[in-house]
Image (tube, rainbow, N blue to C red):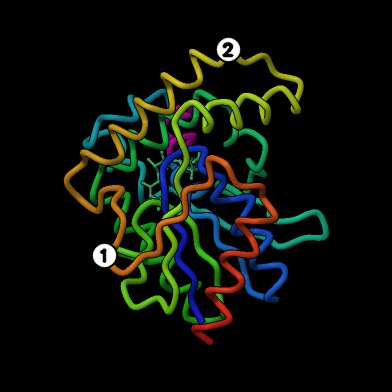
Amino acid sequence: MRIAVDGPAGAGKSTISKAVAERLGYIYIDTGAMYRSVGLAALDAGLEPRSERDVSGILDDIEIDIKNGDDGQSFYLNGENVTERIREPKVSMAASSVAVIPAVRLKLVELQRRLAEKADVVMDGRDIGTYVLPDAELKIFLTADAAERARRRCAELIAKGETADPAVVEAEIKARDKNDSEREFAPLRKADDAVLVDTTDMSIEQVINTILELADKRR
Ligand code: CDP
């Protein structure tokens, strides 16, 4: 069974997907973390993440490893544990910039499809139901009002001890959604056969249960 969860920034995809995977005993695959790792690699190399030529030039030297440990999943970029660094706000836009580049997507999609062959998975991202796993047994499109998504992202940042201005965070989220929806190759889009779940007024537990019920019917 493959569950694809797509949607815009801050809709709760990772929290929900992780919890659903845990309850079903499936593997959770965070594809956003892969784009974040490539975005971070570009920033670390002093490159402009939007430059197709520059980023394509370092692509063969980028190795991403995922390790499952007691405290969740860790991401390694060329041997360095970047689990924390890829969550930095400046990496979000860099991820969205490199995600426009077809060569980046092809490399990561290959890795994603390989991971989904080995186990039952819950995979979250932007193009999972439309492009990466078009035959997924269950597809969810998670969304929420932009203001609510910004509020959630701010709460996350504040919980980590960072400062966050809701207006700035909302502008960043909107800019990223625009970039992700308007790119040519595998843009953010609801698959025709995906179930739309608007989480604006739903608790995390309600969203998890909604998806578990849908999964139960498809198994
Ligand atoms: O958690 P959040 O919604 O902020 O973002 P994320 O899922 O970590 O993804 C970061 C960025 O990676 C997105 O803004 C997209 O540009 C890109 N991405 C993508 O293009 N395709 C995916 N399957 C997953 C992420």
- The residue lying at 33 percent from left, 38 percent from top is 98
Does mark 1's beta carbon lie closer than 8 Å to ligand 1?
no
- Asked if residue 126 is among those painted magenta in the image, a careful observer would answer no
Position of 135 with respect to 158 (left or right) is left
Residue 176, compared with residue 136, is above or below; it is above
Picture coordinates of residue 128, whole percent (x, y):
38, 62
**Mark 2: which amino acid?**
Asp
Residue at the front extreme of this rendering: 201
Three-letter amino acid code at the position of disc 1 = Asp
Residue at 41% x, 42% y: name it: 8
Ligand 1: image quarter:
top left
Range shown magenta: 39-44
Q: Position of residue 61 (x, y in %)?
A: 42, 48
Picture layout, residue 171 above or below residue 123:
above
| Left or right: 37 in relation to 88 | left
Which residue is pictured at 68% across the width and 75% down the height?
A: 24
Labelled disc at residue 213: none
Q: How many marks?
A: 2
Element under disc 2: loop
Residue at the disc numbered 2: 165
Foreground pick, 39 / 22? 22
Q: Is residue 88 above or below residue 212?
A: above
Residue 192: give its label. 1
Beta carbon of the mark 2 residue lies under 8 A of ligand 1: no
Mark-to-mark CA distance, 1 and 2: 35 Å
